[in-house]
Amino acid sequence: MNKITRIAIAVIVCLAVGYSSSTVTREGVETWYPTILKPSFNPPNWVFMPVWTLLFILMGVAAGLVWDKIKEQNEEVKKALGFFLAQLILNAVWSYIFFGLKNPMLALIEIALLWLMIYETYLKFTKINKTAGYLLIPYMAWVSFAGILNASIWWLNR
């Protein structure tokens, strides 16, 4: 399998995970989310879809670049992709906790774990392919912002 195919598969997987978690997010945004207090820096709802779509694409490209090194660095790549998969699952679970369970406090705990897993993935990816690691920086930045937003929503609605 060539690099482009690996990247394409990884991007499709990331977008599929994003789409699956967006189903519960959409319902929450239409029903529960408008009823809770939000901080002044809360972005308009339309911002989230294009930002997450771009981030899932960048994540997929990063994973594909790392996957492409499987023959040269088998164990390191497997470990890095294991962390990537773990953070991808945590990413999806956050939507279910925040929007599905309507539980900002539990979502805040989960997003802290997600951020740590993204950071560990970044470290592992950077050792294998610097570009792959750098592609995760916008994701870490957005999840940092999302964590602050999540904490603020929890605080305002406790």
Image (cartoon, rainbow, N blue to C red):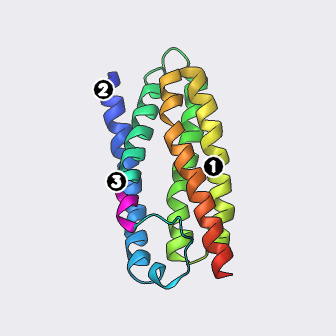
Label 3 vs 1, first from the N-terminus: 3
Q: Which residue is mark 1?
A: 115
Tell whether 110 sits left or right of 56.
right
Tag in front: 2 or 3:
3
Quarter of the picture holding the C terminus: bottom right
Q: CA distance from mark 2 to mark 3?
A: 23 Å
Give the residues in magenta.
45-49
Q: Is residue 48 magenta?
A: yes
Label 2 vs 1, first from the N-terminus: 2
**How many residues crowd mark 3 within 10 Å: few (<14), some (14–19), many (20+)?**
few
The foreground one among 123 and 49 is: 49
Quarter of the picture holding the N terminus: top left
**How many residues crowd mark 2 within 10 Å: few (<14), some (14–19), many (20+)?**
few
Kind of residue at badge 2: Ile
Q: Secondary structure at mark 2?
A: helix
Q: Which residue is mark 3?
A: 50
Q: Which residue is mark 2?
A: 4
**How many residues crowd mark 1 within 10 Å: few (<14), some (14–19), many (20+)?**
many
